[in-house]
Image (cartoon, rainbow, N blue to C red):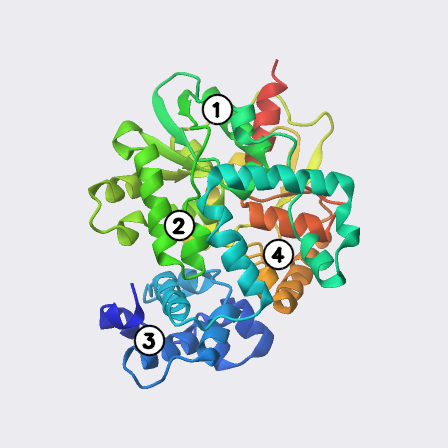
Amino acid sequence: MRLKEMDFSVLQQCMHCGMCLPTCPTYDTTKRERNSPRGRISLMRAIATDDLEMAEGFADEMSFCLGCLACESACPAGVDYAGLFEASRADIEEKGLNKGLGRKLVRFGTLEFLFMRPRLLRWAGRGMRLWQKLGAAKFLPARLRALERQAPEIGERFSNELIEPIEGEGKWKVAMLTGCVQDLAYAEINRDTVDVLVANGCEVHTPPVQPCCGSIHAHNGEEEMARANARRLLDLLPPDSFDVIISNAGGCGSHMRHFAKLLPNDGRAKEWDAKVRDIHEFLVEVKVRPPMAAPFEEKVRVTYHDSCHLAHGQKVVLPPRMVIDLMPGVTRVELKESDWCCGSAGVYSLTQPEQSRLLLERKAGHIRATGAKILLTANPGCHLQIQNAMPELNVLHPVTLLAKAYRNEC
């Protein structure tokens, strides 16, 4: 979908009331109208009506936007900012307006190459793991060393080495999505998720090789690549074969709830959208079994950071907190601005490093103010961003605490 192809009523839906302004991290930084959601929508509308030529200035503005969707949560008119944002980025890609080293590395090194080939991505992960163990980054130029430090630490084993294709039995037949970064860096979270699902009466199907969901492609304007990956997932996990399709990553889950919009002529996509659930949301729906043991020997103080796309994209806010609050020996302290973006936003830390740094510093300050030594979050980008900035912090997924508690029952 392109801006000029959209129903014009979608572009007109913004009432310019300004309720989005206090929720927008980029507007908060600059106080410039063009850096706000309604300012960007005005630009989009002008391009759709040919009152403004699409040029590098527009591309720069769309690159500056985090796509955090906090504006959607605040909007009283229900504006589909995500759709407008992705259409704009698709137009920008089609015209070749994105420039810069960071953007080139993102497109050719990851989006077009690795994130379209899951087996090759794992081989690259193994190579990265060896690179990290050898400490080879010290031989890189300073600029590349800075980029390398933002890469996740690759795990010793990937999801297919930790999870059998079918595990458990029970009332619900569930498809488990392992993700890309989650698979390479946080496969243990996928293992924990399967353990929790099995403990709550699920037969869990986890194909050992899974394509990228296409979230990172759609978010960066690569619409055709996003469609290709969506079709691969529909072929691999036909929605009519499962009761529920589980995601444990906020960004992936948000994207996968909209396959019908991406593939309007594929009859399976609508059923897929209806069956996608975030793990916390599903657990609350099926009345998750409270653990009889605590996840740690000692009592702990934790805080929770909302992934933007889990809170604003999927509207899943209370379920993670409900799951955390079930656990004995765990005291949750609410985090100030818990749903304010941490600056990760997919590849934002590469393409907009300065703004990303400002947001990360703001987030870190609020985390320190809680006094918690454990931060819980449910998206690999947030996990990586915050852990890199705060190595003294133990960053975990909420489902990991639940899995630990279940294991301690034995």
At numbered mark 4, what does the secondary structure look like: helix, strand or loop? loop
The residue located at (33%, 66%) in the rendering is 79
Query: In this rendering, is residue 76 above or below 122?
Result: below
Looking at the rendered structure, the number of numbered marks drawn on it comes to 4
Residue 234, located in which quarter of the rendered image?
Answer: top left
Q: Amino acid at mark 1?
A: Arg
Check residue 15 in the rendering and tell me which mark sits there, or answer none. 3
The reply to whether the C-beta atoms of the residues labelled 3 and 2 are less than 8 Å apart is no
Could you give the CA–CA distance between mark 3 and mark 2, rounded to whole angstroms? Answer: 26 Å
At numbered mark 3, what does the secondary structure look like: helix, strand or loop? loop
Could you give the CA–CA distance between mark 4 and mark 1, rounded to whole angstroms? Answer: 29 Å
Q: Write down the residue under mark 4.
A: 336
Graded by Cα atoms within 10 Å as few (under 14), some (14 to 19) or many (20 or more), the crowding at tag 1 reads some
Q: Amino acid at mark 4?
A: Lys
Query: In this rendering, is residue 55 above or below 142?
Result: below
Could you give the CA–CA distance between mark 2 and mark 4, rounded to whole angstroms? Answer: 26 Å
Q: Write down the residue under mark 2.
A: 255
The residue located at (30%, 36%) in the rendering is 235
